[in-house]
Image (cartoon, rainbow, N blue to C red):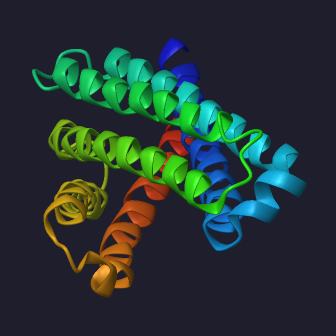
Amino acid sequence: MKDKKLYKIAGLSYIGIFFAAMFGNFFVLDSLKNDPIDMVVNNMTLVSWGAIAFLVAAVLDTIVAWVLKDLYAKHPLTTPSTYFRLIHAALMGMAVYAIVTMRGLTGEESILSQIEIFDTIWLIGLFFFGVHLLMLSNILRGVVPKWITYALLAAGVMYMIDTTAHFVMSNYDSYADTFLALVAIPSILGEMALSVWLLLKSRK
């Protein structure tokens, strides 16, 4: 009974992370980058909700980390995997400060500077999240369908490569769409499939 509840909590939290991150990233952050002054001056309430969405995602990330730690406590990689995910959640929470402190700014350059700070901290967090996914793919080997572990493994590798590319490639923007696809496809497939598997597991 306890494990069923944990599976359900993890599955629902994963789905919550997906929607919170989608809202914060694509509805708020992208709008900030496209029209920073209008968003901060005229739509700061929406910007604030975006910050809250990222905080919610960080909290749910922490919940998933500890639930997975409880469910797979016997695996030797579970503890380090948990800590890498917690580091990611902590960095995401810290990055939100850059969004919150946009209030009152009226210059495009200063707003974009805050966005750059957020992106940099978030990218560092995603590197640690990539390490977590690498370990998680190993932890779940033989537990979930094989293709899910492969998708998680690919996503983990791509998160780490993407963060590295951001920092070392001066022409990263020229390949940004390609990197986005290479990260998003295995990540969405693997993590959404895992969330569905966790929810189905909670019903057995």
Q: Quadrant of residue 73?
A: top left
Residue 98 found in image quarter? top right
Q: Measuring from the top left, give residue 161's x and y in whole percent.
A: 17, 62
- Image quadrant holding the N terminus, namely top right
Q: Is 135 in front, or is 127?
A: 127
Q: Position of residue 28 (x, y in %)?
A: 70, 57
- Determine whether, in the image, residue 200 is placed left or right of residue 168: right
Q: Is residue 203 visible?
A: no
Image point (62%, 58%), residue name: 29
Q: Quadrant of the C terminus?
A: top right
Image: 134 above or below 96: below
Residue 35 versus residue 192 in the image, above or below: below
Q: 164 left or right of 73?
A: left
Residue 163 seen in the current view: yes
Q: Compare residues 122 and 58 and report the one nearer the observer.
A: 122
State the residue at coordinates (28%, 60%).
Answer: 155
Residue that protrudes farthest toward the left in the picture: 76
> Percent x, y for residue 63?
51, 22
Apparent side of residue 20 relative to residue 77 in the rendered image (left or right) = right
Q: Residue at x 24, y 46 (%)?
A: 127
Instruction: Tell which of 28 and 133 is nearer to you.
Output: 28
Q: Nearer the viewer, residue 197 or 9?
A: 9
